[in-house]
Amino acid sequence: MENVNRDKLVGDLKVVLADAEDLLKAAASATGERAAELREKAQSTLKRASERIGDVQESVVANSKAAARYTDDFVHDSPWRAVGIAAGVGFLLGLLVNRR
């Protein structure tokens, strides 16, 4: 579910940025009131993108805090299991690094 939301967000942001780029290019060649209107549209589009990024940032921070809390609880509840898992991961990483 999270990957779907992230992929949708990335797609949405690409569209928004492409739209803003097109609007800015059009504004560069336009003059007067039309240029001001295009620049305003581009600013609005970029503001929406910025707000979406802020929403995603909040979600990522919340998920990271939840993962850290879960990890902390796990380590405190099962310290020797955590040490064993860390040793196993370290051993596997050592094997992978040694192969290169």
Image (cartoon, grey):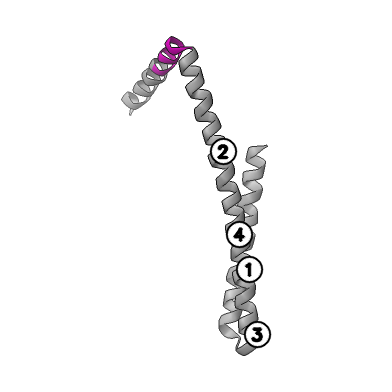
Marks 1 and 2 sit apart, C-alpha to C-alpha, by 27 Å
x%, y% of residue 45?
63, 66
Who is closer to the viewer here, 31 or 53? 53
Which mark's residue is nearer the viewer, 1 or 2? 2
* Residue under label 2: 62
Residue 34 is labelled as 3
Marks 3 and 1 sit apart, C-alpha to C-alpha, by 15 Å
x%, y% of residue 83?
40, 14
* Residue under label 1: 44
Q: Check whether the beta carbons of the residues at disc 4 and disc 1 lie within 8 A of each other.
A: no
Q: Is residue 31 above or below residue 47?
A: below
Q: Amino acid at mark 3?
A: Arg
Q: Amino acid at mark 2?
A: Ala
* Residue under label 4: 49
Marks 4 and 1 sit apart, C-alpha to C-alpha, by 9 Å
Marks 3 and 2 sit apart, C-alpha to C-alpha, by 42 Å
Who is closer to the viewer here, 14 or 58? 58
